Image (spheres, rainbow, N blue to C red):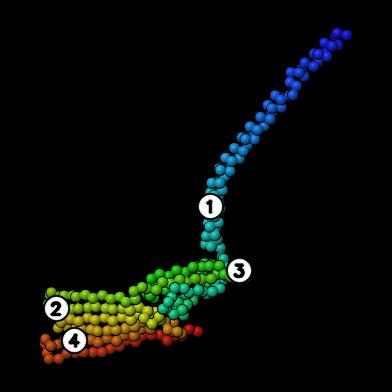
Amino acid sequence: MATPVEQDQNRQEPIAENPNGDEEHEEPSNGEDDEDDEDLDDDEEEEEESQPLTEESRLSAERTKLENLFRRLSTERVTLRVHDVLIRGNTKTKDWLIEAEVEALKNANTMQELLQAASIANARLHRLEIFDSVNITLDDGPPELPGTANVIVEVVETNNPLTGNIGLFTKPEARSWSLEGSLKWKNLLGYGDIWDGSLAYGWDQTSELSAGVALPRFKGLVTPMQARISLLSQDWLKFSSYKEQSVGSIPRSNFNQES
């Protein structure tokens, strides 16, 4: 009878060593918590590293799109039609004058033709000599009209339309001197008109007074118009007893009209 009792006690001994089983359960739980903390730290580091990479990738994607767009514009025929031409910044210059100079924009049917026409229109507006700056911008057309664009022409009229110069010139070998000056007024009437006057006066020599006006175009006229009048006086009192004077005018225009 004693033998089975001892066997029962021996069987119960391992149970008494850890009755609650705390050590066995605590060790794996602590290891899992450490692994979770490490995973969270790794995730935070990955998020911090991913932010600059995402910004760089976005810039790279935009750069690639722009390169593809420029390549397409230079090689492919991109159909595009001008819906409207908007003119801004002109307070004195007539709208029809600017519209006439940028008329080629409305006839463009492709992006390449539109860019070329915009370059020509910019040069023509600068040639009028009445604007300090010219900026031509292409904008999207109405959403309901795909494949169209609006052209915005922004001009800055000259702040100082009145310019002039004057000078005194001498000729020691001829013992004579002359006073010369000129005056120019730009866009006086808003038609792109340029008025100018000049004076050259010399003692005992020829003197000249002249005035003129130039128009780049007027309504239906497609070519410039110019008119000038001058007064010429020659002093012969040093050699004789009279003065010689002459008056002349030079009108010049082409009356070809737009069809």
Q: Are the two marked residues, 3 and 4, in contact with CB atoms closer than 8 angstroms?
A: no
Precedes in sequence: disc 2 or disc 4: 2
Q: Is residue 214 left or right of residue 32?
A: left
Badge 2: residue crowd in 10 Å (few <14, some 14–19, many ≥20): few
Q: Is residue 133 above or below residue 218?
A: above
- Which residue bears the numbered disc 4? 234
In what element is the residue under mark 3? loop
Q: Name the residue carrying label 1.
A: 59
Among numbered discs 2 and 3, the one appearing first in the sequence: 3
Q: Secondary structure at mark 1?
A: helix
In front: label 2 or label 3: 3
Q: Looking at the rendered structure, which numbered label has been put on residue 143? A: 3
Between the C-alphas of marks 2 and 4, the distance is 14 Å
- Label 3 vs 1, first from the N-terminus: 1
In which quadrant of the rendered view does residue 30 lie? top right
Q: Amino acid at mark 3?
A: Pro
- Residue beneath label 2, please? 176
Horizontal relation, residue 87 to residue 166: left or right: right
Q: Dividing the picture into quarters, in which one does residue 80 lie? A: bottom right
Residue 134 can be seen, yes or no:
yes
- Residue drawn where x is 36% and y is 81% of the image: 188
Mark toward the start of the polypeptide (1 vs 2): 1
How busy is the neighbourhood of tag 1: few (under 14 within 10 Å), some, or many (20 plus)? Answer: few
The structure residue drawn at horizontal position 53% and vertical position 54%, both measured from the top left corner, is 63
Per the model, the C-alpha gap separating discs 1 and 2 is 72 Å
- Give the residue type that dot 2 points to: Ser
